[in-house]
Image (spheres, grey):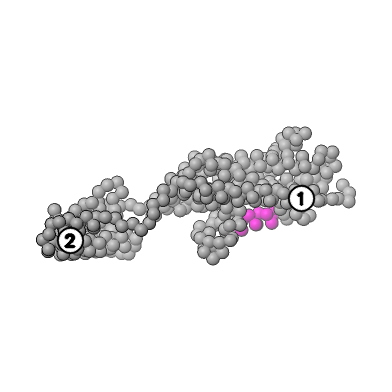
Amino acid sequence: MFLHNFKYELKMVLRQREFIMWLMLFPIALGTLFKVAFGSIYSNNDMFKSIPVAVVNAQEGTVLNEIFRSLGEGEDAALAITYADEEWAKELLFDGKVSGIIVVDNDVSLQVAGKGIKQSILEEIVSRCNMYQEVIGQAMITGDETELRKVIAELGKEVNACRDVSPAADNPDVYVQYFYNLIAMVAICGSLTGLHVATSSQANQSELGARKNCSPTPKFKHLSAAFLGSCVAQGVSMILCVTFLKFVLQINFGGNLFLLYAAAVLSGCLGVALGFFGGSIGRLKYEIKSAILLSCSMVMCFLSGLMVGNIKGFLAERMPWVNRINPVAIISDSFYCLNMYSDYRRFFTKVLGMVIYITAFIVFGALFSRRKKYASL
């Protein structure tokens, strides 16, 4: 009997228009729009690239020339250097082919045509070059070669006050958070299928609910079969969503792919459990409960950063408890932790939070459901 109920509950869920709309078609459309809007912003604007610069009057064999040569070598070179005379360098700057002109004379000077991150980096490089030149010049005045080598060696040491932490991140793109929140939105919209589980067992909500309450089959079997069927359907929609984003739109989520799918399926179960809990409370009509759940889901998505990317950071500074209790924020944070941290401790902490929510929603939803009584059917 359980398998029979499970089969037909699964069929009913898959036939719901809300399921097809919110959990199948809408994520595909929104994910495609996100890809068009954010797909190349990070690579074009935020990812560091060698800064094109023109160097004038650089003389072979000098200390400054060696410094510039080292800055322009390697795959991750800081500078893309073009050695030029002053007239050609100004043409390059005017045409926007270089971000600045470094002129080497008695000291090092910089000419730029605007302000920005690249120009600020060039100013810092020029400032360092002048400092190195002065320190080395003072050491050369003494005529002590040992002291000169010592000074050069000390200047060559990299002082780093930070501790290196190896992230798991295959993708440090900050805009990928919108896709994390898109997956979380699909998961939490699974509350619509969970709502169907609760209302289809209530005699005052539908003819099907009245028939179920007259059936000799224990209510626990009806509810468990319906809930499991909804979780399976929601799990399939989560797998399809992640697969579409990962392999069709080519979104690099980083981290462990198996754990990514597992977290997505678990988050889908959280959405179903939320809908089951919400549908078990009160005697409002299905349409009203559906509107309330959908509105609450959108508010939670907004607070998690689906619409405004930096709102989660804003809340973390002023009201950190919001991110801790918001199910959508917990779901999106689980994907973020999986991508950014090689240590899975943070990820499993978020997973534990989802499990606690699922358990609480199921327990309280079941308690509210079994207390329903009807004067007549």
9 displayed left or right of 94: right
Amino acid marked by disc 2: Ile
Q: Nearer the viewer, mark 1 or mark 2?
A: 2
Q: Residue 275: where, in percent of width, then height?
A: 69, 50
Question: Quarter holding the N terminus?
Answer: top right
Amino acid marked by disc 1: Leu
Q: Quadrant of residue 163?
A: bottom left
Q: Which residue is drawn at the image coordinates 50% and 57% (left, top)?
A: 309
Q: Residue 239: where, in percent of width, then height?
A: 57, 40
Q: Residue 193: where, in percent of width, then height?
A: 68, 46
Badge 1 or badge 2: first in the primary sequence:
2
Residue indicated by mark 2: 136
| Residue closest to the eye, 41 or 117 | 117
Q: State the CA–CA distance, disc 1 to disc 2.
A: 79 Å
Q: Which residue is drawn at the image coordinates 48% and 44% (left, top)?
A: 255
Q: Residue 293: where, in percent of width, then height?
A: 68, 54
Q: Is residue 159 magenta?
A: no
The residue range painted magenta reads: 290-299
| Crowding near the residue tagged with mark 1, few <14, some 14–19, many ≥20 C-alpha atoms within 10 Å | some
- Secondary structure of the magenta portion, mostly? helix
| Residue closest to the eye, 148 or 350 | 148
| CB within 8 Å, label 1 to label 2 | no
- Residue 141 shows in the view: yes
- Residue 85 shows in the view: no
Residue indicated by mark 1: 367
| Crowding near the residue tagged with mark 2, few <14, some 14–19, many ≥20 C-alpha atoms within 10 Å | some
| Mark sitting on residue 92 | none
Q: Which residue is drawn at the image coordinates 48% and 47% (left, top)?
A: 343
Q: Which residue is drawn at the image coordinates 57% and 44% (left, top)?
A: 263
180 displayed left or right of 6: left
Q: Quadrant of residue 129?
A: bottom left
